[in-house]
Amino acid sequence: MVQDGKLLEMYRQMLTIRFFEEKVFELYGQNLVPGTIHLYAGEEAVAVGVCANLRRDDYITSTHRGHGHCIAKGARLDKTMAEILGRRTGYCKGKGGSMHIADFSIGMLGATAVVGAGIPIATGAGLSIRLRGTDQVTACFFGDGASNQGTFHEGINLAAVWRLPVVFVCENNLYAMGTRQTRVMLIDNIADRAAGYGIPGIVVDGNDVLAVFEAARVAVERARRGEGPTLIECKTYRLKGHSRFDPATYRPKEEVDEWLKRDAIARFQAKLLDMGVLTEAEVQRTVQEAKNDVEKATKFALESSFPEPLEALDDVYASEESATQK
Amino acid sequence: MREVTIRDSLREALREEMQRDESVFLLGEDIGRFWGGAFGVTKGLAEEFGDERVRDTPISENAIIGVAVGSAITGMRPVAEIMFGDLTALAVDQICNQAAKIRYMFGGQVSVPCVIRTPFGAGVNIASHHSQSLEAWFMHTPGLHVAVPSTPHDAKGLLKKAIRGNNPVFFVEHKLLYPIKGMIPDKDYTVPFGVADVKREGKDVTIVATLYMVLKALAAAEQLSKEGISAEVLDPRTLVPLDKTAIVKSVKKTGRLVIVSEDCKTAGVSAEIAAVVAEEALDYLDAPIKRVAEPDTPIPFSPSMEQFVIPSEKSIVQAVRSVISRA
């Protein structure tokens, strides 16, 4: 049984991610976000349900739709928002932006915007754990689109055959940009592909944070015991389009309405109220606190300066004198 | 000092660095106890260090490099082998988008200390998918270092330096160089990146050459000396960083430049070196720069055609004569 405190923390994190993404969308509308954005709103249960099983020293890899992964792993909101706004106080000093946030101090190994590229990198982090002899675990987030990349096959097969401590988490939001899953694969469940690698493949309701938590708990424990990887497919849905200009007209209204009824936060909140873990007053307070946290982070980011142009020339190469990193 | 082949010198570098640092490990296709690598470089290392540190992989080039990257950013120092240089094309995303960019994209939070070893070069009749020289692709990718040794001494010293360094290194070997012998010190040593080496001193013309072309350039220089032409042969040893200072200095001394490189001519290694000299030492040139490189074709199979496309000692001699006659 998950402890009440942990449930409340998960609830607070899901709200924070939702409000954070709503704020990013709002700032985008005000022309304050350079480039593009891929919002995580709607998929909060996946990142939160998985990361609630991870320790600070465990690793995650992330994708172009990665803000939620960062927040769920414990990244600072202010440095995350500053990076998205291209400020020098951001996690990557403005060099990465929305699609490339990393925080190595919390095991967040970074978001790659090449679809599927994080999969073999996660396998490599798993191998590193094995070779260093620790009991860390790597969780690898990717989407349904990535499951059609060669890296999915190469990376998962290698993790399987070496029995590495990696949990592969497929966030299946049904659409790779505008291409519906049914148009690019003949199977309903991406998790079925796990059988091809000789590892467990689990399908869960990705809008049910407790279902995700439980599936991830089993997979993380299995990985920590040295029994190898698991592929978890989380069926979920994004609230917005793929990226900034996408009105997502390829999604039928009935489908969108149906998924909105399954909103992960509303469901979890109702459940917690029902369980008596949460009261209406606490809902109000938690919502307000999460909004305040996002506001503070936004203020920090907006008050931060942009990098000096010449900073573009820094960080291409590491100093050869620096010590071996751990 | 003692005499070893480049193959042996590379193996010594791997062995010594694995002994020195537990975080160093090897991965690649058939590098373990059954083959010891397609060219025998890792022979015996699995027996010595075990299968955990000398890992045979499936035929999954992109994952080999991805795994190297993932382990490098979490405390390890992987040395990945890609069996043939042409096959790096399968891993270009992990090499060029991930290994090369991770440090930069993430604002310098982490470095990617990994080495990617692979053999380039034609001349053994294995056709278009096993013979090409693609150094220029990787020179064109900021974030990577590119090493191109031509002697056992340089191969060992550069590989040790690469493994100890904190940047991803694309380490080029040449198939025909593996059995070539040379002297190396008995003591531990490294060769710095970005420092060219004068393989033969001369005063009439500078020949910049890399990898197997260094041997051909030296043979050409020997032949030219009999005609009274004194050729200086300069080996950059690393293309990134490139020792522009040494190249410019040599050109200022000789006033003539011939560049020999086994990649195809267009936008190749020789183009970059020619551009450096054109920008920084044009006024010192007594003749136009001459490039000896491969024509813009894939490498053909049949020996008669293959030998035609590879720069030859004769073509180097002719190129030198042509710049000398322009005095």
Image (cartoon, rainbow, N blue to C red):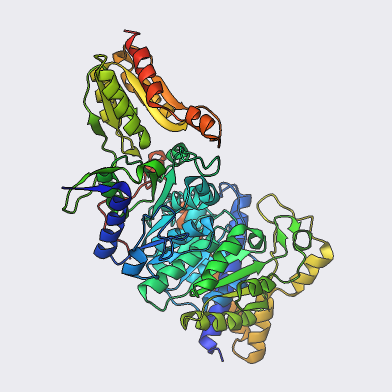
Q: Residue at x 70, y 55 (%)?
A: A177
Q: Residue at x 47, y 80 (%)?
A: A226
Most foreground residue, B142 or A30: B142
In the rendered image, residue A151, in percent from the top left (x then y), is placed at 58, 59
Q: Is residue A251 left or right of residue B130?
A: right
Residue A76 in view (yes/no)? no
Q: Quadrant of residue A8?
A: bottom right
Quadrant where the image shows the C terminus of chain B: top left
In the rendered image, residue A15, in percent from the top left (x then y), is placed at 59, 72
| Relative vertical location of residue B146 with respect to residue A109 in this rendering, above or below | above
Q: Residue at x 22, y 22 (%)?
A: B202
Q: Is residue B236 left or right of residue A51?
A: left
Q: Is residue A302 left or right of residue B228?
A: right
Most foreground residue, A297 or B10: B10
In the rendered image, residue B203, in percent from the top left (x then y), is placed at 22, 18
Q: Quadrant of residue A157?
A: bottom right
Q: Quadrant of residue A261?
A: bottom right
Q: Residue at x 56, y 84 (%)?
A: A218
